[in-house]
Amino acid sequence: MLVSAEEMLTKAKAGKYAVGQFNINNLEWTKAILQTAQELNSPVILGVSEGAGKYMCGYKTVVGMVNGMLEELNITVPVALHLDHGSYEGAKACIEAGFSSIMFDGSHYPIEENVAKTKELVAICKEKGMSIEAEVGSIGGEEDGVVGAGECADPEECKMIADLGVTMLAAGIGNIHGKYPENWAGLSFETLDAVQQKTGTMPLVLHGGTGIPADMIQKAISLGVSKINVNTECQLSFQEATRKYIEDGKDLEGKGFDPRKLLAPGAEAIKKTVKEKMELFGSIGKA
C-alpha cells in the first residue's frame, strides 16, 4: 500500500540519513527500483514528473501499475508515489488519481501567489493524509521545459513557505538538474545551514542528486537534507547497458531481440545505481 512520505522523512531527518526519490519512466524502471528497495529493506519514493506521467498515459495508469506491483512483488517497505515538480493543475490531478505525495513547484510565481496556492494544496493533502513538498528558489538546469540557473533560496522565504504546513521543503542551494557543468561552483552549505535554522525539524530536499560528489551529499545530509532526488543517473546507467548489449550484437543472437531480453541489462544497471545511492544516503535497513 502506498504511504505518505511524511513518516519516512521524519525518521530520516532524526536519524541523519536520507531517503532517495528515484524517478520512474516505465515498467522496467518501477520494477527495478521497487525490487532494490525491498531487497535492501529501504524506504523509497517513486518520483513522477509531469512529462513522464504523460508518457505513461496519465496518472491513473501510473497509480494502477505501482499498486499492482506492490501487491504482486510483495513489497513490504514503505513506498511513496510522488509528483515531481508539479504544476498547480498537475498536483490536483495526482491527488485525484491516487498518488500518496505531491510536489507543488510554485517557485516561478511571485511569493504571494506561491503562498496562496501552496496553502490550498496543503489543506487538501492534510485531509487526504498525503505529504506535500514545496520549492523556494529555482533548481538549475532544465526539467520539463523549466530552466533555472541554480539560485540559492532566501531563508526567510523558506520559513514563510515551511510555516504553511508543508511536509518537506526543496530549497535551491546552487544544485541543478541533469549533468553538472565543468565550472559548477558546488553546493552552498551556508544557504542550507541558514534554511535549516529557520525551518527546524522540517525535512529538506535536495534536487539534482546526479553528479554531486559523495562528500557533499553526506555534508548536506548532516545539515538536514532527508530526501534526495535521483533521475539522470539511472537514465545514464540504463542507456550505457542497453548500448553495450546492442553493440555486442546480443540482440542478433537467438531471441535476443525480445524486448524482455533487450531491456534486461538496462534494468539491472538501474538496480545497481539505486543500490549505490541507497548506500550513500544511508537508507539501507531503515524500512
Image (cartoon, rainbow, N blue to C red):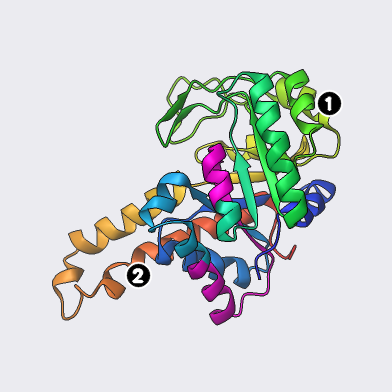
**Between 248 and 266, the one nearer to me in the picture:** 266
The location of residue 189, given as percent across then percent down, is 70, 25
**Between 194 and 285, the one nearer to me in the picture:** 194
x 57%, y 36%: residue: 213
From which residue to which does the magenta span run? 64-93
- The Cα atoms of the two marked residues, 1 and 2, are separated by 46 Å
The location of residue 34, given as percent across then percent down, is 55, 67
Is the residue 232 above or below the residue 36 in the image?
A: above
Which label is found at residue 208?
none
Residue 271 visible in the current orientation = no
The residue positioned farthest toward the left in the image shown:
252
The location of residue 118, given as percent across then percent down, is 68, 34
**Looking at the rendering, in which quadrant would you find the N terminus?**
bottom right
Is the residue 74 above or below the residue 244 in the image?
A: below
Residue picked out by circle 2: 264
Q: Is residue 55 magenta?
A: no
Residue picked out by circle 1: 198
**Between 253 and 192, the one nearer to me in the picture:** 192
Q: Amino acid at mark 2?
A: Ala
Helix, strand or loop under label 2: helix
**Between 250 and 225, the one nearer to me in the picture:** 225
Q: Amino acid at mark 1?
A: Lys
**Looking at the rendering, in which quadrant would you find the C terminus?**
bottom right
The quadrant where residue 186 appears:
top right
